Image: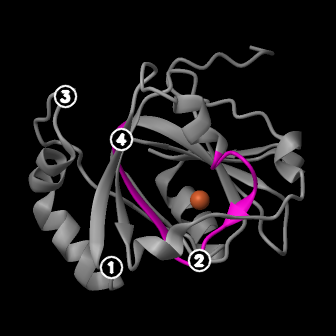
Amino acid sequence: MAIVRIPAEEVVLREPDDVRAFLGRHTIDFEQWVPNRPLTATASADEVLQAYAPEVDALKQRGGYATADVIDVKPETPNLDAMLARFNREHWHDEDEVRFIVEGRGIFHVHPTDGPVFAIEVEAGDLIRVPRGTHHWFDLCADRRIRAIRMFMDPAGWAPHYTESGVDQGFQPVCFGPSYVAPHA
Ligand SMILES: [Fe+2]
């Protein structure tokens, strides 16, 4: 279940209703699916899409998405740092950013126009839609593992536009996950 943090307000939201309501106020759709399809660690993108075909098809219809693919990274993925560097600076897209997390975790920071930056830590089972134009950036957690289904209206519309604001520099991509121990605990 996703965790939302608002560092400037020292707020952490963990209750599903609170998370959904908060994100909804920022026009970010959030749902939970059950990531229960048997998949091996080496399953191909096609196998992942096939395993979740009913959900993917439903989402395509609902959101008008034309295509889906799978992002699948592990610590040993070649050129992982270069890949991550494209997305860990504040940017926006001309398309919605739609992700269903099948395995692993990651952290989106969102910089709304009318409030402080907040972080959304997503994990397996979380389905998130960040609307087009939303300023955001993304990092992996310390385990550097995520497998997620992505939806596109037009993949060409998904190139990142960087704000070059430097706002991202002020936020540590620290995930709270199950193994997190608070420094003051
Ligand atoms: Fe993005």
Query: Is the C-beta separation of discs 4 and 2 under 8 Å?
Result: no
Which range is magenta? 86-103
Residue 177, position as x, y percentages in the image: 53, 28
> Does mark 1 have its CB less than 8 Å from ligand 1?
no
Inter-mark Cα distance, 1 to 2: 13 Å
Query: In terms of sequence position, does the residue under pointer 4 or pointer 2 come before the other?
Result: 4
For residue 167, above or below residue 159:
above
Query: In terms of sequence position, does the residue under pointer 1 or pointer 3 come before the other?
Result: 3
Query: Is the C-beta separation of discs 3 and 4 under 8 Å?
Result: no
Inter-mark Cα distance, 4 to 2: 23 Å
Q: Nearer the viewer, residue 165 or 37?
A: 165
Query: In terms of sequence position, does the residue under pointer 3 or pointer 2 come before the other?
Result: 3
Residue receiving disc 2 = 132
Residue receiving disc 1 = 65
Residue drawn 28% across and 79% down?
Answer: 66
Left/right placement of residue 75 relative to residue 52 reads: right
Q: How crowded is mark 2: few (under 14 residues within 10 Å), some or many (20 or more)?
A: some
Query: Is the C-beta separation of discs 1 and 2 under 8 Å?
Result: no
> Does mark 2 have its CB less than 8 Å from ligand 1?
no
Image quadrant where residue 50 sits: bottom left
Residue 81, position as x, y percentages in the image: 60, 30
Residue receiving disc 3 = 42
Residue receiving disc 4 = 124
Instruction: Classify the position of ligand 1 by quadrant: top left, top right, bottom left or bottom right.
Output: bottom right
Residue type of the residue flagged with mark 4? Ala
Inter-mark Cα distance, 3 to 4: 17 Å
